[in-house]
Image (cartoon, helix red, strand yellow):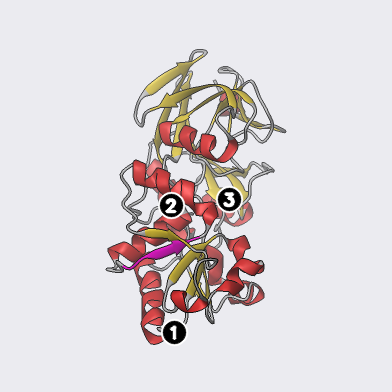
Amino acid sequence: MRARDLLCPKPGGLYCAPGDFFIDPVRQVKRALITHGHSDHARPGHGSVLATRETLDIMAIRCGEDFAGSTQAARFGETLTVNGVSVTFHPAGHVLGSAQIAVECGGIRIVASGDYKRQPDATCAAFVPIPCDVFITEATFGLPVFRHPPDTEEISRILTSARQFPERSHLIGAYALGKAQRVIRLLRDAGYHETIYIHGALAKLCEYYESRGVALGDLQPATVETGSKADFSGAIVVGTPSAFVDRWARRFPDPIACYASGWMRIRQRAKQLGVELPLIISDHADWDELTETITETGAGEVWVTHGREEALVRWCELSGISARPLHLVGYEDEGD
């Protein structure tokens, strides 16, 4: 069997013909295997969904309990059979419950990584390199300019700023799933034990993370209806990126706008967003992590998707590894 006979790109996403299933389909399909709960990968309306327990729970929180006709939970390292094709879920280190999916049939193993990162993260299981014949990698930050600093260094910058400006509030923009919980946990691990105020859009997911053993400390709603702006002097507030552009952000005393994202490496992007304190904290692998991961898998062939595909394909070719872009559409950088 050839690799492209096992998995191939279709308009609906990555399709496995022998197993008759899609991985992270962008359209409603009969059978879907989902890598993680971000909305560009986990869409509602499929006939059946196979994913980790956490991803299924997150989909229910975000899409409603009836997000699929039927569901099945996969445990990390457990091999399941779908129409004669072996599938195994392995940690991806992206967000809680995120997985790489190894697909095996006819003596060929293909690993679809979904989104992944290699930096330590106390809020999810760490990425595990899986030996394979073909590795399907994301390339969100697939350019040599993207090299993420240690997240502990970035989080220390906001704590330093909070000490320097005790009269001002610090508003951190962070995606609701994964990034917000990671930022909160980084603050706790750095010794910040004060109340952290959160936007209402984060509440249910933070509660779920807590239920799965991820300690986030004292979290309170970031509302001022029952108090005054002065109540938030010196406070750290975590909200969704979109909250920066509405009246919600103007409720706080002389707020310092912060944004946790790998894109904060690009100064112009931070400036355009009005970010005063950019935090380079990403839930995706940077250039060095992408290339090191490809090497660690031992894959003889690499398929590159949703990101800066050309540069990573070229790096593979120069390294003697066969590579091609998949040009899949419908995937964004929600979890960045």
Q: Nearer the viewer, mark 3 or mark 2?
A: 2
Query: What is the quadrant of the N terminus in the image?
Result: top right
Stretch in magenta:
194-198
Q: Nearer the viewer, mark 3 or mark 1?
A: 1
Ranked by sequence position, the earlier of labels 3 and 2 is 2
Circles 1, 2 touching at the beta carbon (< 8 Å):
no
Q: Position of residue 136 (x, y in %)?
A: 53, 40
Q: What's the mark number on residue 113?
A: none
- Quadrant in the rendering for residue 155: bottom left
Residue 93 can be seen, yes or no: no
Three-letter amino acid code at the position of disc 2: Lys
Q: Please say whether residue 106 is one of the residues in the magenta stretch.
A: no
Main SS of the magenta part reads: strand
Work out whether 118 lies above or below 152.
above
Question: Is residue 16 left or right of 82 when viewed as pictured?
Answer: right
Please give the name of the residue rendered at 48% of the width and 46% of the height, measured from the top-left corner.
204
Q: Report crowding for label 3: few under 14, some 14 to 19, many 20 or more residues within 10 A (C-alpha).
A: many
Question: Is residue 189 left or right of 87 when viewed as pictured?
Answer: left
- Quadrant in the rendering for residue 324: top right
Q: What's the mark number on residue 117?
A: 2
Residue labelled with disc 1: 167
Q: Position of residue 208 (x, y in %)?
A: 41, 43
Please give the name of the residue rendered at 53% of the width and 36% of the height, measured from the top-left corner.
59
Identify which residue, 243 or 134, lies in the foreground: 243
Q: Position of residue 277 (x, y in %)?
A: 50, 77
Ranked by sequence position, the earlier of labels 1 and 2 is 2
Q: Please say whether residue 196 is one of the residues in the magenta stretch.
A: yes
Per the image, label 1 sits on a secondary structure element best described as: loop
Please give the name of the residue rendered at 38% of the width and 37% of the height, measured from the top-left corner.
130
Per the image, label 3 sits on a secondary structure element best described as: helix
Residue labelled with disc 3: 313
